[in-house]
Image (cartoon, rainbow, N blue to C red):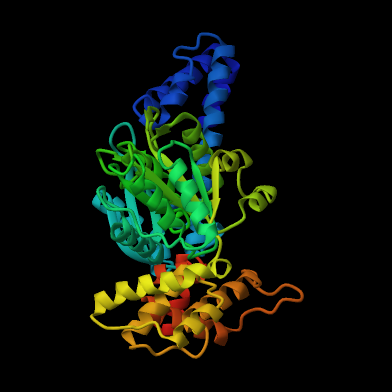
């Protein structure tokens, strides 16, 4: 019947033009009610009169559909779409990555059948369609992957359900986000705090403090470089709390600890309705919330390339745009970036934007490792000893054997390792370990071995970490730190990797 009608219209060009124009107007009327399509709507002719105008309008629709397909497929959130009968219509690349299920295994199949086979347990899409509302429930995907899945029935312009869309997040990723926020709440600096104590007996550290005092009252962006544990965040707090922004907020954010999908909204905020689950009132990001104060972007080398562009725009214009918004908001905040990696090398490798590097590198400060400023070791040890003897109500005289021990160590973990060592001495009443700190040695050994070991298999001439070696290191770290987030941070791996390995070796 449809073919006969199409044939009739082709024989009658005017009828064909009228029918095509009607379809065009139906489409335009539908997207006019969708805020997401506002830009597309503005580029579609309102009332095309000629076939040429109609062709241009339909070409624009096709272009937008192509772009929308690319957006959905490359979205970092797992996306699954089924029609009102539960037949799978679309899944994106992130669905495959999250679930481990190939597209060809689900396309054209009903979600209830996938449920009965154990691929979806239960089918969130089927539940959302049946109840006609958004549902968020735990789901086992592909037999053993624990996820939290959101299912939303999609309505047409008449308010009728015509499909359902679901998004899945792995439980371990949600735990990582939760642990990140808990860590941030514990570490967040509040206005009115005093400047931290900086140990600066060595000439190198005195030079750094003199430079910090010169620049603390300026707007200039600062780039702090140095090994893990040398005191980069400590120096950032010193600059903030001794400078003219001390009455404002000091915010610290670890760019490597936040899932990329969350990082943009954390930094720049979002407007209402920017994404599923967003606060209905919208939310200011950390940059905007730090207005009048300072923000420390730690591990800046881990910032995704797309966000590097947005950060560069802010540093150049001192304005931010919230996710999903169009309004530029002026923000007066001092930016301090910190890294333990060589940014120049990352620029050369194409992993970090050159223009952002030069914008950050206005006032570079490199903090030397503890082994290169030995004059600071004993004063720092005494400072930490005073701190922990007061905390635990114990005594810890720094005896000659301790002095010799401190001076001989390499302190690969720098001040952080020294502080951990002093706390151990206090709680064990002065018992010195026979060798390098077990946990620090473990951390650095694992990091070095992991850097030599590719994600799968081995490279020629490089030995992969054996399962028994990995098991020993992971369990030691977990016993010490107690959470997958802290284990990941200590061992230089992603939180999701740390979580999987902890579950594997603890049997949890």
Residue in the picture at 49% in, 38% down = 310
- Residue 181, image x and y in percent? 32, 58
Q: Most extreme residue toward the top, as rendered?
A: 49
Number of numbered discs: 0
In the rendered view of the protein, which quadrant contains the C terminus? bottom left
Can see residue 369? yes
On screen, residue 106 above or below 315: below
Residue in the picture at 37% in, 29% down = 330
- Residue 49, image x and y in percent? 51, 8
Q: In this view, does 287 lie to the left or right of 76?
A: left
- Residue 87, image x and y in percent? 43, 53
Can see residue 82? no
The answer to which of 368 and 51 lies nearer the viewer is: 368
Specify the quadrant of the image occupied by residue 359: top right
Residue in the picture at 31% in, 72% down = 387
The answer to which of 479 and 128 lies nearer the viewer is: 479
The answer to which of 301 and 22 lies nearer the viewer is: 301
On screen, residue 35 above or below 146: above
- Residue 162, image x and y in percent? 36, 42
On screen, residue 71 above or below 125: above
Q: Is residue 183 left or right of residue 51?
A: left
The answer to which of 119 and 464 lies nearer the viewer is: 464
On screen, residue 307 above or below 186: above
Q: Is residue 98 left or right of residue 194?
A: right
Q: Most extreme residue toward the right, as rendered?
A: 460
Specify the quadrant of the image occupied by residue 371: bottom right
Residue in the picture at 46% in, 47% down = 212
């Amino acid at each position: 019947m449809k073919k006969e009608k199409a044939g009739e219209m082709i024989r009658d060009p005017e009828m064909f033009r009228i029918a095509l124009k009607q379809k065009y107007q139906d489409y335009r009327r539908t997207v006019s009610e969708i805020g997401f399509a506002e830009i597309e709507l503005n580029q579609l002719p309102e009332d095309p009169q000629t076939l040429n105008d109609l062709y241009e309008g339909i070409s624009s629709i096709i272009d937008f559909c192509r772009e929308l397909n690319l957006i959905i497929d490359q979205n970092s959130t797992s996306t699954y779409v089924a029609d009102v009968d539960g037949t799978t219509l679309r899944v994106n690349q992130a669905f495959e990555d999250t679930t481990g299920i190939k597209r060809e295994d689900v396309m054209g199949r009903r979600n209830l059948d996938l449920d009965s086979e154990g691929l979806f347990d239960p089918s969130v899409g089927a539940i959302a369609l049946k109840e006609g509302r958004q549902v968020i429930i735990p789901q086992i995907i592909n037999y053993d992957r624990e996820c939290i899945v959101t299912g939303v029935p999609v309505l047409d312009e008449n308010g009728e359900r015509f499909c359902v869309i679901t998004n899945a997040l792995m439980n371990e990723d949600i735990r990582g986000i939760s642990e990140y926020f808990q860590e941030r709440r514990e570490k967040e600096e509040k206005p009115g705090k005093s400047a931290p104590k900086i140990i600066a007996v060595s000439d190198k550290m005195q030079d750094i403090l003199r430079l910090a005092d010169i620049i603390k009252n300026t707007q200039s962006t600062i780039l702090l470089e140095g090994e893990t544990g040398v005191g980069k965040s400590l120096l950032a707090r010193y600059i903030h709390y001794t400078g003219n922004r001390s009455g404002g907020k000091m915010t610290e954010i670890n760019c490597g600890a936040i899932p990329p999908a969350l990082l943009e909204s954390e930094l720049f905020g979002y407007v209402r309705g920017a994404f599923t689950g967003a606060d209905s009132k919208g939310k200011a990001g950390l940059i905007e919330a730090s207005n009048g104060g300072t923000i420390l972007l730690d591990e800046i080398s881990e910032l995704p390339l797309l966000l590097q562009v947005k950060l560069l725009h802010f540093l150049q214009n001192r304005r931010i745009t919230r996710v999903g918004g169009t309004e530029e908001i002026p923000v007066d905040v001092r930016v301090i970036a910190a890294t333990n990696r060589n940014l120049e090398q990352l620029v050369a490798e194409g992993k970090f934007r050159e223009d952002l590097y030069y914008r950050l590198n206005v006032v570079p400060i490199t903090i030397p490792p503890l082994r290169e400023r030995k004059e600071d070791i004993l004063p720092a040890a005494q400072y930490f000893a005073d701190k922990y003897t007061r905390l635990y109500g114990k005594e810890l005289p720094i005896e000659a054997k301790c002095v010799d021990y401190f001076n001989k160590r390499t302190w690969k973990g720098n001040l952080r390792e020294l502080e951990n060592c002093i706390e151990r001495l206090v709680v064990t009443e002065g018992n010195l370990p026979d060798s390098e700190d077990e946990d620090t040695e473990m951390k650095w050994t694992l990091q070095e071995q992991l850097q030599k070991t590719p994600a799968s298999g081995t490279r020629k001439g490089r030995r992969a970490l054996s399962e028994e070696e990995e098991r020993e290191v992971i369990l030691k770290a977990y016993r010490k730190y107690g959470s997958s987030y802290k284990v990941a941070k200590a061992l230089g791996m992603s939180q999701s990797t740390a979580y999987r390995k902890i579950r594997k070796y603890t049997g949890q």
